[in-house]
Amino acid sequence: KAGVTQTPRYLIKTRGQQVTLSCSPISGHRSVSWYQQTPGQGLQFLFEYFSETQRNKGNFPGRFSGRQFSNSRSEMNVSTLELGDSALYLCASSLGLHNEQFFGPGTRLTVL
Amino acid sequence: KNEVEQSPQNLTAQEGEFITINCSYSVGISALHWLQQHPGGGIVSLFMLSSGKKKHGRLIATINIQEKHSSLHITASHPRDSAVYICAVRGYNTDKLIFGTGTRLQVFP
């Protein structure tokens, strides 16, 4: 069974631009969560989706948004990029909301 | 004070040693996760537990709900165990995952 895939793996953007990251969960998994990891703040929860509905959201500004499609694939979008948005963005999928999570390799975003 | 505290922050061991990493939390939880992150970023879920003890190979995880404390043990450590180990709890009220800052383990041959 294929693991969680994330695209792109690396991304360089400039301040003010917007970016869309994609996550394809393990087949059969209906829950997708997104996390941001930075050297200063560590791992922080962004969103959690189940059956196309956002079930939970972390403490991030409205510039961070996401969605989940009917095939459980998920995207997250960051608008008006700031230097501080440079981070590793990780997605994880699970069968349901409170099951073991399986992480993707991450997308490393650099904002210049 | 962070809601999830791990100790130690850094740990160095010789191959074969028994290793313990501790996690304390201050919120009510529905589950606790132990994660392993290798250089390069990939994260692997090691355990998810809400009570008692779980074992997988050379890894053992325990949790004491009353004391709000969990430990991850590695028996017969090996250089391939070198990684950052992260404790995360799912808050009972918020239903969000809260992460510890991680323990960096280096095992030397």
Image (tube, grey):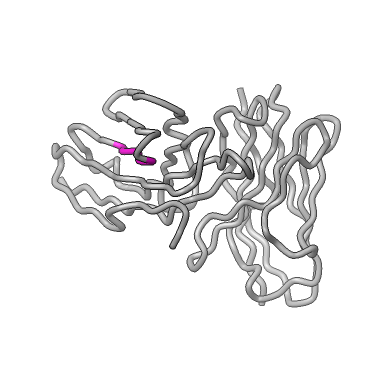
Quadrant, the C terminus of chain A: bottom right
Q: Is residue B20 magenta?
A: no
Side of A34 where B57 appears, left or right: left
Front in this rendered view, residue A106 or A51: A51
Percent x, y of residue B56: 34, 23
Q: Residue at x 24, y 41 (%)?
A: B20
Q: x and y percent of residue B11 in the render?
A: 23, 53
| Left or right of A52, for residue A49 | left
- B46 sits to left or right of A62: left
Magenta segment includes B70: yes
Residue B92, by quadrant, is top right
Q: Quadrant of residue A73?
A: top right
Relative to A19, residue B4 above or below: above
Magenta residues, as a range? B68-72
> Where residue B96 sits: x, y (%)?
61, 44
Give me the residue at 46% from left, 28% from top. B50
Residue positioned 35% across, 52% down in the render: B6
Q: Residue furthest front?
A: B66
Tally of numbered discs: 0
**Residue A30: which quarter of the image?**
top right
Left or right? Give the position of B72 relative to B65: left
